[in-house]
Image: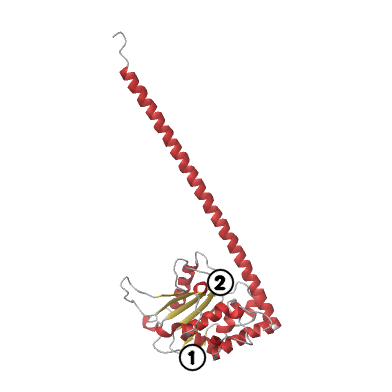
Amino acid sequence: MRHAIDPKIDCVFKALLGSEANRALLIHFLNAILGSDLPRPITQVEILNPYHEREFLTDKLSIVDVKARDDQGRLHQVEIQLLAYPDLPARILYTWNAIYNKQLQSGQDYRLLKPAYSIWILGEDLLPDDPYYSHRFRLRDDHGQGLLDHGGIYLFELNKFATEQVETEEQRWLKFFKDGEHLDADQPPEWMQTTEMRQAMSTLKAFSEQEHAYDRYQARQDFLRQQSCIQGRLREAETALEERGAALAAERQAKEAALQAKEAALAEVERLKALLQAQRPAAGS
């Protein structure tokens, strides 16, 4: 390829999984991620927001995700998120709820509801204290009893994914998204020697070799770098504010402790004065 292309950049990601030309890739991806949780494999999907090149040229704040309905009526959302931030868990839950909630119109029967699956591929760790790279959140009680088997939220933290030997299609996709930027399209590794991976690599190659596509890719990269820089500065400011707050709190506590010590010392002086006064002989005795 003329240029290295990162499949995690949103316009590339959406071209891979959200375009009509790559409908087969989306089907394969969904089966790879959800296979064990589906009664049978997905064979058809309707892409609900098909990828259009112009949307990235005109709207740098475009909501970048892939939404689809499969042949059983189940709903799917696939998101790439490069930056983690404190409110991201709330956003993840809210968007899953929005997909599930919008199925019914006023007066419709709850029996019409279909499962909704929300898949997030994360470029930064969202759960830094958890060593596992994959997380499947379902509606369960404290004893593991499910309330309703209607989908869930699937998170994959690429920084934690370190598998070298690909054994499953899920691992193949995650390795592609993590290492795709560094792959040689002319001499791909053995784990890329599948129909789906060759098709995915051809999409990267198109971004690399078509001038207008590469310009769009660079523009998105620049925008994401700016976002990362701004978020980094915001984190630094928040850290500095927290440190200043902690310093002020410590200073306040020190002053309060000094004041309490002073009051205790004054009280002790007064006590000793009273004791001394009581021990003096009465006048004229």
Which residue is rendered at x = 67% and y = 74% of the image? 219
Which residue is rendered at x = 52% and y = 82% of the image? 173
Whether residue 45 appears in this view of the structure is yes
Residue 229, image x, y percentages: 62, 64
Three-letter code for the amino acid on which mark 2 is drawn:
Leu
* Mark toward the viewer: 1 or 2: 2
Which residue is rendered at x = 55% and y = 79% of the image? 177
Question: From what the image shows, is residue 55 above or below residue 265?
Answer: below
Front residue (pair 280, 27): 280
The disc placed on residue 44 is 1
Three-letter code for the amino acid on which mark 1 is drawn:
Gln
Which residue is rendered at x = 41% and y = 89% of the image? 40
For mark 2, give the secondary structure.
loop
The picture quadrant where one finds residue 74 is bottom left
Residue 8, image x, y percentages: 58, 77
Front residue (pair 257, 59): 257
The image quadrant where one finds the C terminus is top left
Among all residues in the image, which is located at the extreme right?
A: 211
In the shown orientation, is residue 21 left or right of residue 41? Answer: right
Q: Which residue is mark 2?
A: 82
Question: From what the image shows, is residue 137 above or below residue 184?
Answer: above
In the shown orientation, is residue 139 left or right of residue 169? Answer: left
